[in-house]
Amino acid sequence: MKISALSAVVAGLAVVLGTAPAEAGKRENILKFAADQVPENIDAYFNNVRIGVIIAHHVWDHLVSRDPKTNEYKPSLATAWKWVDPKTLEFDLRQGVKFHNGEAFDADDVVYTLNYVSNPENKVITQNNVNWIAKAEKLGPYKVRINLKQPFPAALEYLAGPVVMYPNEYYEKVGPKGMNEKPVGTGPYKVIEHQPGRLVRFERNADYFKESPRPQPTIQRLELRLIPDNNTQVAELMSGGLDWIFNVPPDQARQMRSVSTVKVASGETMRIVFLTLATREGAAAPQFKDIRVRQAVIHAIDRGAMLNAVVGEGARVLHTQCFPTQFGCTDEGAPRYDYNPAKARQLLTEAGFPNGFEVDLYAYRERHQTEAMIGYLRAVGIRANLRFMQYAAMRDALRENKAAFAHQTWGSFSVNDVSASTPVYFKFLADDVTRDPQVRDDLEVGDTSVDPAVRKAAYKKALVRIAEQAYSVPMYSLPVYYAFTPDLDFAPYPDELPRFWEAKWK
């Protein structure tokens, strides 16, 4: 269904339905929401799509919690912590907390979780989130020590975000497969049903610990439906089959704002959009080894025009591959590539491609944005063929060197530090398709120095070199449009995490 056709559907449904659909979820105290991505595994360490991150924050808890408004770290599963030295953290753990299956939380759970996920043999997908951990050890029933491989100043930021705690006895028995089938955490919601690829049902955790920095949830049940087609999501929201959706395209969001039975909210998030251009040996598109071709790609796309046409309110053009609020992110000293199709064609000619070339462009979300990029590229002779798929399939193709060109997004697991962003793609990890030793070494200094000034200088050096070499095309920050029933009291946050434990029915 095209957007123009959808507008008629939106208008028609609004007239027919009035306000009745908005009351269903409130009456039943169940919030039904949807996502267009399918997590390959609900296990928080074995998927890295946004809906997986959202699920993780509802089902599991962290040692510490970062207040999204003040950025202050607060006690969660840990009641206190201290840096013994730059490579050692110690935590006092909260007593009396239970997992959803009744297992008591203690030091054994923390030690087992951290040692399991940081062991490369266990092939955790989110390696960058845990590869700084050398070993966790038990100092007492409710006291643990985390030994770091090297200084890592951002450790608390990770322990407050993507690093969640698992029940050791259960996880040792079922592993990632069992955790996917029946997740068990200590969080404000517990999973009561999982139909892979289709549905996840949650229920409020009646035994959620009262001392949590997160409020006790008031919505009894959540129901996540995995619906790849955005137009279907909109139609379901309009008919009362859903109460909340996100990643609504800007054109649809504008149309829906005129509908009384729907509320639309939006805002810039930490998620950045960029194109990756593989230059490592054996890459599927050897053209990108020539810096002039990479520069041509950047000059070919009018990023500023895309903000107004297909991206939406609150976005900004980026010149380096990180989000501006993250510690260490800067575009100072980085070159500015203006929209200049004539320059792009000239660079392609100089590189030996006067008639351009054909290449596959991989993508997994915001298809309308990818199609706009393809239009710009074709105008200068780069005939990009869209390969649209689920994220895991695209990620694997890139990691296996079978794909060279991709429209990517990255939300840094909501970690407000460059270590969660740029190094993922440029520090010789699985997603690094360039493999520049100089960039890697500069990022390593930024990740491990205990001196903030040294960290910033190292990150700046790496970011400037990436931009000068045109190793990637930083596009823009990505705003998110949420659409939901007016009966729902919901507040979005810049970290792209909907906090349903805070949501309430009006």
Image: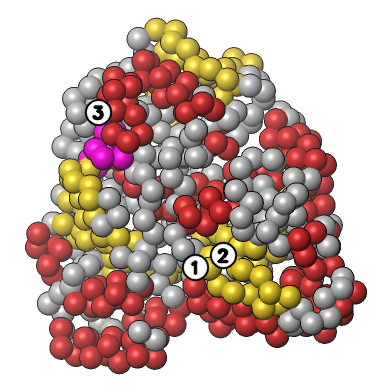
Taking depth in this image into account, of 310 and 430 the one nearest to the observer is: 430
Disc number placed over residue 388 in the picture, else none: 1
Q: Earlier in the sequence, mark 3 or mark 1?
A: 3
The answer to the question of whether label 1 and label 2 lie on touching residues, with beta carbons closer than 8 A, is yes
Taking depth in this image into account, of 432 and 222 the one nearest to the observer is: 432
What kind of element bears circle 1?
strand
Q: Which residues are magenta?
A: 179-190
* Tag nearer the camera, 3 or 1: 1
Query: At 33% from the left edge and 17% from the top edge, which residue is drawn?
Result: 106
* Tag nearer the camera, 2 or 3: 2
Q: Is residue 144 above or below residue 207?
A: above
With 106 as the anchor, is 136 left or right in this view? right
Which quadrant of the view contains residue 356? bottom right
Q: Amino acid at mark 2?
A: Tyr
- The residue pinned by badge 3 equals 99
Q: CA distance from mark 3 to mark 1?
A: 39 Å
Disc number placed over residue 362 in the picture, else none: 2
With 49 as the anchor, is 25 left or right in this view? left
Which quadrant of the view contains residue 7? bottom left
- Tell me which colouring the rendered structure shows: secondary structure
Disc number placed over residue 122 in the picture, else none: none
- Say which quadrant the N terminus sits in: bottom left
